[in-house]
Every structure is written in C-alpha cells, then in structure tokens.
Amino acid sequence: MLRSYIKRKDVKALQGMLDSPLFEGALSPSARVERVRVDQSTEAYLVEGTPVVFRVKGVFLPALRWLVTKEVRRCYVVVDEGAAERILKGAHVMRPGVVEYDPGIEASKPVAVLMQKSRRAIAVGVSEWSGEEYAERTRGRCVVNMHYAGDWLWRLEL
C-alpha cells in the first residue's frame, strides 16, 4: 500500500469531484487528508485515520463505516429484509426489494442502500436508474452493489 498526505488544493479539487449529497461533511479543506492506494483499482481517502471516501474502479463512494454514522436523507433506496440478506452477501439491488427511494436519485450516481426497519446503511452502490424510472418500473436491477457491510473494503485495515 502506498500512503501519502494530499495538499489542501487537492482536497478542494477532490471535494469538487464528490458531487453527491452522500459526501456532505466527508472532507473539509482544513482537515489533513491521506490517500492510500490499496490496489490497482482502489484508493482510500482517510481523515484523521478514518476512511471516508473510496475510489473503486474510477467511481467515488462514501466509505460505509463512515456513512453508518450519518443520517442519510438523500440519494438512498430502502430495501426489505429479504433483499437486505442478499445484498449483504454481495447481490445487486433489484427493484422488487425496494420499498422506498429518494425521488431525486440520478442515474450513474452513488446511492446508499438502507434497511427498512433501522434505516441504517448496509451498502453503497451506483444507481442505474433515475427517480422517475423507479416510479415507472417494477422489475430489474436498479443499483449496482459496490461496497457492503462485511466485504473486503469493510474489513480493510489501514
């Protein structure tokens, strides 16, 4: 693993690339941010030693361990218990398991996957549909699961 602190101007540039509401509060220009190259396709951005953002295959995602400490109010889908079990094993989110969603979701943007009862984040992925498509469709894959509780990113020791 290659580790290095990034300059404040690079932190500001990174903040500009994190255009989803899921990243609110993740980085501040005054914080010391460390970049860790985990492997060829994965980078982690740490604040005070805690991963807050991952870049996986060119896609920026909030770190799930950081996200579970936040209340997610935008860019989310809520899934039932049956879907949650499969998602926690790495399955993608299918529309029949979605019981609620943020109508402001944009296609190709990160979304949090929340459990129905606790409303806690169990996964982060990229939505394949916009909010309007969630309203129109009842079948098919709607979120590509990229990081879930218990996966290798969750267990990563930095």
Image (spheres, rainbow, N blue to C red):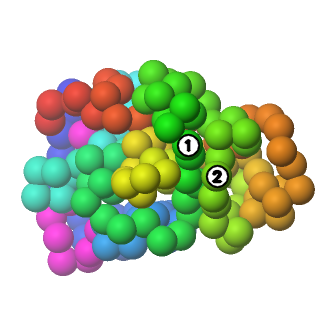
Horizontally, residue 5 falls left or right of residue 87, namely: left
In the rendered view, tell whether residue 69 sits above or below residue 56: below
Give the mark, 2 or 1, whose residue is nearer the N terminus: 1
Residue at image point 55% right, 59% down: 76
x and y percent of residue 155 in the render? Answer: 23, 28
Using residue 139 as the reference point, say whether residue 125 is left or right of it: left
| Residue 99 disc label | 2
For mark 2, give the secondary structure: strand
**Residue 74 seen:** yes
Quadrant assignment, res 138 = top right
Q: Is 120 colored magenta in this rendering?
A: no
Q: What residue do we see at 31% from left, 65% from top? A: 70
Identify which amino acid the numbered label 2 is placed on.
Answer: Val
Q: Which of 151 and 9 is in front in this view?
A: 151
**Residue 45: x percent and y percent?**
28, 50
> Which of the pair 125/84 is nearer the observer?
84
Residue at numbered disc 1:
80
Q: Position of residue 57 (x, y in %)?
A: 52, 34
In the image, residue 52 above or below residue 28: above
Image quadrant assignment for residue 66: bottom left
Inspect the magenta stretch and tell me whether residue 34 lies in it.
yes
Magenta region: 27-36
**Residue 128 numbered mark, or none:** none
Alpha carbon distance from label 2 to label 1? 6 Å
Screen quadrant of the C terminus:
top left
* Labelled pair 2, 1 in contact (Cβ < 8 Å): yes
